[in-house]
Structures are given as structure tokens and as C-alpha cells.
Image (cartoon, rainbow, N blue to C red):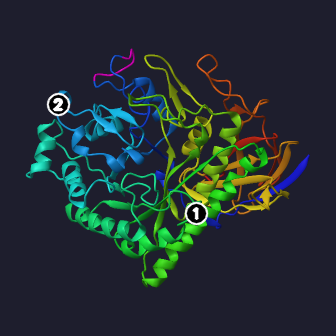
Amino acid sequence: MQQAKIILDRDFVIGEVDRYLYGSFIEHLGRAVYSGIYEPGHPDADEQGFRKDVLQLVKDLGVTIVRYPGGNFASGYNWTDGIGPRDRRPRRLELAWRSIETNEVGIDEFVDWARKAGVDVMAAVNLGTGTPQEAGYFIEYCNHPSGTYWSDLRIEYGHKDPHSIKVWCLGNEMDGPWQICHLEADDYGKKALETAKIMKWVDPEIKLVASGSSTSFMPTFPEWDRTILEYLYDHVEYISLHRYYENEGDVDDFLASFVDMDRFIRAVVATADFVKAKKRSAKSLMLSFDEWNVWYQKKLKLMPWETAPPILEDRYSLLDALVVGGLISTLINNADRVKMACLAQLVNVIAPIYTERGGRAIKQTIYHPFRLAARYGRGEALKPIVKAPTYGTRSYEEVPLVYPAATYDEASGDITVFVLNTSQDVPVKVELDFRSFDGVSFAEHIVLDGPDLHAINTFEEPDKVHPRREKRVEPMKTDVFSVTLPRLSWNVLRFRRNRDE
């Protein structure tokens, strides 16, 4: 059995965990919308056609904000296609994903769905085929109270009160040649700057997200980010990052994906801080990691012009869930700068929730680590001091055998430690030292593991992979505990600080 030690100190604070760290993403792609969140005629559909079984799963998942309507879809989308009477809305060829878009669901319906789900909306404007003026009209329609053409049109279409969407993305992945009307960095910077000015003139209270590099592998990274921020730094609150991971046959390498995510975050922070220094600015730019997940992109096959085709419907294994657990820990460990993040996506398309048309909905394996982190990973992120063996992989020279993240909620006294055990061979005995908390009691140990790394949840076996409760940890001495982490497991260790009455 391997040995490791984790020390947590109340004063070693990384930053506050923003509630928007637990966001997700719905794009007009595949079955994310149609037969995902929306399916009129389904036995469990509500009066607007939204699936109540999916709504319940979204609430249970703990999602706080959802990015919409894209994604690549946004770069060719005219938002006015999705407003007004449904029988007058146009059917369009959707070029990003080679589909037919019916426009049955638009911004009004999505805001209605978001309110039912208890989530905020992060809206994206079209900076591909779209113009700065169209983006201004979009936010006027959504956020202006009344008395103008677009706000009165919203009222005419059944929404008297403004949607009050306060987070907006300035396009999507505009560095990517696959994007509709892809732009070079200077061109995007100029266009996004004029768009940002108009949007904030309409609603000065909004927060804007600049379209950063679509992956760390782009040949233009990080020069793209530096260039666009020299235009946008004073006008935006966030820069976006996108990154997906895939098992390419090396389990050790795949489990260590959190190392790459951490390096990507640090590189973007360094780039943003360079622009901060160059501009002599007092503002520190925050990060929005608004697309992240495991995605088996090599399996992508587009279909010829169907409505809501079943594409990108990855079925996730226990191994995938362990990797997602490690990625969530990385987001928490960078909570000082990563203030928003979106697991992409939410339903059917590379998603934690999977549905049948007209039938059931189940939790995929990756549902579980996200749900547990969203529920217990609140308060301040603490910086763990880790003493553990390391190993090398094909891509990374040094990977810790155990990878922790920790949060402390001062109001409740709850301390949560998330730990990924990457060992394929043996359990790891971990000593947890809470030396500065002046009295800690054990509450719970939740484990996600199993005998088959490739096990998936199906409609026939929806709980084949699910968290379990482990036996109590062993107190060693005051504020020091010993816990054995099973091989290849993601663990949630919950403690409570003792308080004087």
C-alpha cells in the first residue's frame, strides 16, 4: 500500500469558489434541445413541452448557469429566427452541424426553461455572420424594460418582464478555422470591441466574456489571447478557455488530464496578466472555462440534414468519470481566477444526462462527480500541501499519485476534500492533517470506483456506476485522520469544524 499526506490550513486560501464554477452548456446541436430538454408529446412534458424528468435531473445536478445557444451554432445563428409565433418561424439549414434547425425553441423559451431549472443564463452573441448592431438589438430585446421596438416586441410575444441576462459571450471559438466566418485575432478584437461597447451602452450592468483560444493546441495560442485582450481588456470581465480530453489508449496519461488543464489555465492567466501589466491596469481579468469535458471527437460523424440527429452522444465509463473528477478538482484549485466553468454539454450531447426519445432519462457516470462537487465544493478553496509519490506518463513527467482539492465553508463549518487516486495497482493510505482548525470531526466518505473501468450506465442498468459510502476514517490524533483510498477512485471526504456553543 502506498502512503501520502495532505495538510490543510485555514489560512492557505486560494480564493472564493464562485457559484458559476458549476455551470453547463446547451447548444442547438444534436439532441441537446430537441428530445433533450424539450420534447412536446413526451409523457412527462409540461405545458411548454419541456421534459420534467430532465428538469429534475438538472436541479439535482446542481448546475448554476447554462451557456446558450452555442457553441459553433452561434456563429451562424440569427436570434430573431427563434422569437414570435412558432408557426411563423423559419426552418433553416444549420451549417455548423449539418442539421435542420426548426427554431421551435428560441431565447424566450430557453429563459422560461432556465427559470424552471433554477439556473442563470450565459448568452452568446453571433460574431461570425452577425454584426455588432444585431448583438445590441439582442440584448435590448432581452434586458431593456420597455418603450423601444425590441423590448416592446418581447412584451408582445408574452414576456412583460425583462429576461435580465447578465453574462454574455462575445462569440464562440473565433480563432478556429472550422468556425463560420472565422476571424484573425486583430479582426476579432476590433469587431468584439465595437460589439462590447454597444452592448454595455444598452445595459451597463452586464458582464462580458471574450472568446479566447478554443484549445491549448491551437498554433495561435497564446498569441491569439494576447492580441484580442489588447483590444478588449478594459471592456470585458472574462476570457474563455475550451478544452476536451480523450482516452487514446494510455490510462495513466488519460487519468493525468488534470495536469494539462492546470497548465492551460496558468498559461492564460500569465497572458492576461501580461496585458494587465502592459496597460498599467489595476483590474485582474477572470477566466471562464466555458467548455470542458471528456469528448471522443474521433467518433464524430455528421449526418445529412436531419432535425436533431443523434450525434456526439458519447456514453461515459467509470474511467471517464474519474477523469472528470480530476478536472473538477483543477477548477477548484484555480478558484482565484477561474470564476465560471461550463461542463459541455448538459443533455445527450457529450453530456451527464442521457435520454430516450419519448422514454427514459438516466444519469451518465460523469453526472456523479459533478453533482458531488456542486453540492459540497462551496466556500473558499484551500491550497492543500501534498506529500505523495509521483510517476511519469507519456505526456507528463511528474503526476501526483493522489490529487486533492479542498473547500472550507466558514458559515457552516463544512470542510470537503476531493481526492483522485490515480494508482492502478494498490490503495493509497492518506493522512489528513487539519492542524489549524482547532477541532474537526469526520462526517462522510463517498467513493466513486468499481471493478470495471469501462462500465457505463444504461437504461437497463442506470446505476451500474454510482457513488457509495465507505466506512469511517480512522482518527490518529487531534485533527489528524487516516483514510484508505481504493485504487482508481475519486473520493469526497467531508469533515466539520467543531465550534464552541
Q: Kindly report the distance in space between the C-alpha atoms of the residues bearing marks 2 and 1.
A: 45 Å
| Residue found 23% across the figure and 64% down from its top | 198
Q: Which residue is mark 2?
A: 88
Quadrant assignment, res 94 = top left
Query: In the image, which residues are magenta?
Result: 42-47
**Residue 237 on the magenta span:** no
Task: Categorize mark 2 by other alpha carbons within 10 Å: few (<14), some (14-19), many (20+).
Answer: few
Query: Mark 2 vs mark 1: which is more N-terminal?
Result: 2
Name the residue rendered at 44%, 45% in the picture: 64
Q: Is residue 44 above or below residue 132?
A: above
- Say if 472 sits above or below 418 in the image: above
Q: Is residue 356 visible?
A: yes
Decide whether the magenta segment is chiefly helix, strand or loop.
loop
Residue 494 percent coordinates (x, y): 67, 45
Quick one: 226 or 451, which is closer to the camera?
Answer: 226
Q: Amino acid at mark 2?
A: Arg
Check disc 1 and give the amino acid type: Ile
Q: Identify which residue, 65 or 75, lies in the foreground.
A: 75
Q: Are marks 2 and 1 in contact (CB under 8 Å)?
A: no
Q: Is residue 415 visible?
A: no
- Percent coordinates x, y for residue 479 in the rendering: 77, 55
Please provide percent x and percent y for residue 416. Answer: 65, 49
- Residue located farthest toward the front when viewing the structure as drawn: 304
| Disc 2 secondary structure class | helix
Q: Determine the residue positioned at 28% across, 22% down.
A: 47
For disc 1, the marked residue is 265
